[in-house]
Amino acid sequence: MSDSSRDFENKAVLKSLESVYCPAAIKEARERQDHILIERFRGYPYAIADIGCGTGYHGSIFAPACRLYHGFERAPDIASIAQERWRQEGLNNTTLFLGDVTKATLPSDFYDLVFCLYFTPGNFREPSPDLSLYTDAYLDRNPSFIAIFSRFYQALKPGGLMFLTIYKDVPEAEEAQIDFYEHTGQRVVTARGTRFVATAEHFWSARWTRESLLSNLTACGIAASAVLFHDLNHIAWLVKVTK
Ligand SMILES: C[S@@+](CC[C@H](N)C(=O)[O-])C[C@H]1O[C@@H](n2cnc3c(N)ncnc32)[C@H](O)[C@@H]1O
């Protein structure tokens, strides 16, 4: 992907993260995701990795009590916002790793918790201007997803947990995605019913079936028996992986 395409994508992502408008179903899923994680994990001295940490929202929630918080973020402008936010909050146990997380080098058996929230697992793909690359077969065995989650599963301590928030592949989720991207100044270029929504601004977000997620996780060396799907609402799952 060219630098200017990546710039467009990063600006589109930042706009959506800062948008006051959010479709009701997406807002509800996000609030439920946060409620569950806060109830279970805030206030404990965990080592936490946040894949695609965005503007640092979850760092602000968990870092005040956790042992360490590692945010992984590719977009420089977004990463700077996270770093500045954590600096202002005095969160000295946070570290921002800037770069493509597909290539992250990680310690083994290190993290208690790995988060990949707010539909971020559906953003990982090898960038291509040719959208026909992203066939169902690709989505069922996505090389970027597999590179990332193999690494982070390895980096999780035995007994550690990984949480992924994903869209279900249902028409209501697609409607909400389109609504969100169009309200944040993007132009959707995919036909309805495609398993991902892509925009002219190079943003890309896939939806999932249980089978497609399990197929990708199995390719990461994760057994289906370690994976639990929790319904956030009619458009979203919070998926728990236990190591
Ligand atoms: C949907 S946003 C979610 C941000 C944050 N987790 C939240 O809940 O607000 C996804 C984030 O992942 C980042 N991202 C996408 N692909 C990435 C990659 N390959 N490496 C690192 N960060 C990536 C994007 O730049 C974006 O900030």
Image (tube, rainbow, N blue to C red):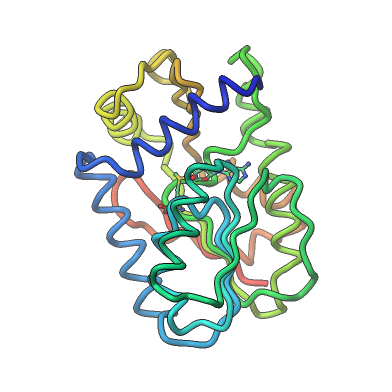
Instruction: Establish if 133 lies above or below 221.
Output: above
Q: Quadrant of residue 40?
A: bottom left
Work out whether 222 lies above or below 76: below
Q: Nearer the viewer, residue 239 or 66?
A: 66
At a point 40% along the width and 68% down the height, the residue shown is 88
Q: Please state, as top left, top right, bottom left or bottom right, where the N terminus lies in the image.
A: top right
Which of the image's four quarters has the C terminus? bottom right
Q: Tell me residue 107's x, y (percent).
A: 79, 69
Where's residue 138, x and y in %? 67, 28
Task: Identify the residue at horizontal 44%, vertical 20% (top origin).
Answer: 199
* Left or right of 133 on screen, residue 151: right
Using the image as rendered, state which of residue 56 and residue 147 is in the foreground.
56
Seen from the viewer's position, the closer of residues 65 and 109 is 65
Viewer-nearest residue: 110 or 63: 63
Q: Residue at x 66, y 80 (%)?
A: 159
Q: Position of residue 184 (x, y in %)?
A: 29, 29
- Eyeballing the image, is 158 above or below 232? below
Q: Residue furthest bottom?
A: 44
Residue at 77% from the left image edge and 57% from the top image edge: 221
Q: Position of residue 112 (x, y in %)?
A: 62, 77
Q: How many marks?
A: 0
